[in-house]
Image: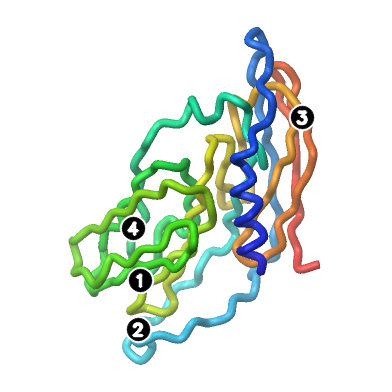
């Protein structure tokens, strides 16, 4: 249910906010998202559980902070891009990826074992099939939404791709800090998303050419 509701919120980004006057100067939203040290995650059984290597600790601190609705010109500013989500040490790197619609994501296999990257997400389902070390698979993501990503061979591998219809978003760093630049002045609803915690929303006013501090604390509630 959590993924479904936040997916609806992402799709709502298609409803764009009014644009600022042409003479207005863009501002920034910055802050920090605090999350519990180790949010609980249910294991997903898989075919390679008996042969999988001992797993390193998975960093689940990353969050995505984004504007619920982008400025009017957001569509005109979008440019198709290309990025990557590696497979290293039987983990996806980065584990949380935020992109704009139309972006192509490469999934190179930098391990010494086969992988099979797939997703059953409604916004973009795909299955790259089994491919060997050194090989690569690619997927284009055209629709906004949350895309959970898995490996059909290694049950402990999971990741998330968040696809937006605008460019006003940021992934937090290891200290939970984020910054969204070039935001036209105005009033916005800002969302902080985490893979296993309820999303939090705040209203914020971005001044003409100024910076706004906005912090979040996510919890199970």
Q: Which residue is mark 3?
A: 187
Disc 2 is placed on an element classified as loop
How much space separates mark 2 and mark 1, taking CA atoms?
A: 9 Å
**Quadrant in the picture for the N terminus:** bottom right
Q: Which residue is mark 4?
A: 86
Q: Is residue 140 left or right of residue 196?
A: left
Q: Which mark is residue 21?
A: none
Q: Residue at coordinates 47% horizontally, 48% vertically from top-left? A: 143
How much space separates mark 3 and mark 1, taking CA atoms?
A: 42 Å
Q: Name which quarter of the figure residue 215 lies in.
A: top right
Dot 4 crowding, Cα within 10 Å, few <14, some 14–19, many 20+: many
How much space separates mark 2 and mark 3, taking CA atoms?
A: 49 Å
Residue 221 against residue 93 in the figure, above or below: below
Q: Position of residue 19 (x, y in %)?
A: 66, 21
Q: Is residue 7 left or right of residue 108?
A: right
Q: Which residue is mark 2?
A: 52
């Amino acid at each position: 249910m959590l993924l479904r509701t936040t997916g609806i919120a992402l799709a709502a980004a298609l409803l764009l906010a009014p644009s600022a006057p042409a003479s207005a100067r863009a501002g920034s939203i910055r802050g920090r998202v605090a999350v519990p040290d180790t949010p609980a995650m249910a294991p997903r059984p898989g075919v390679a559980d008996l042969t999988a290597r001992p797993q390193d600790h998975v960093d689940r601190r990353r969050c995505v902070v984004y504007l619920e609705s982008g400025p009017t010109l957001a569509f005109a500013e979008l440019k198709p891009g290309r990025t990557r989500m590696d497979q290293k040490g039987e983990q996806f790197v980065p584990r949380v990826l935020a992109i704009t619609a139309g972006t192509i994501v490469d999934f190179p296999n930098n391990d010494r074992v086969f992988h099979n990257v797939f997703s059953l997400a409604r916004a973009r389902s795909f299955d790259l099939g089994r491919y060997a070390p050194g090989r690569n698979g690619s997927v284009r993501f055209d629709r906004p939404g949350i895309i959970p990503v898995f490996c059909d061979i290694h049950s402990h591998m999971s990741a998330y791709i968040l696809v937006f219809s605008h460019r006003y978003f940021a992934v937090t760093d290891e200290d939970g800090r984020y910054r969204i630049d070039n935001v036209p002045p105005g009033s916005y609803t800002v969302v902080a998303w985490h893979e296993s915690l309820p999303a939090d929303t705040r209203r914020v006013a971005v001044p003409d050419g100024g910076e706004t501090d906005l912090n979040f604390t996510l919890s199970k509630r």
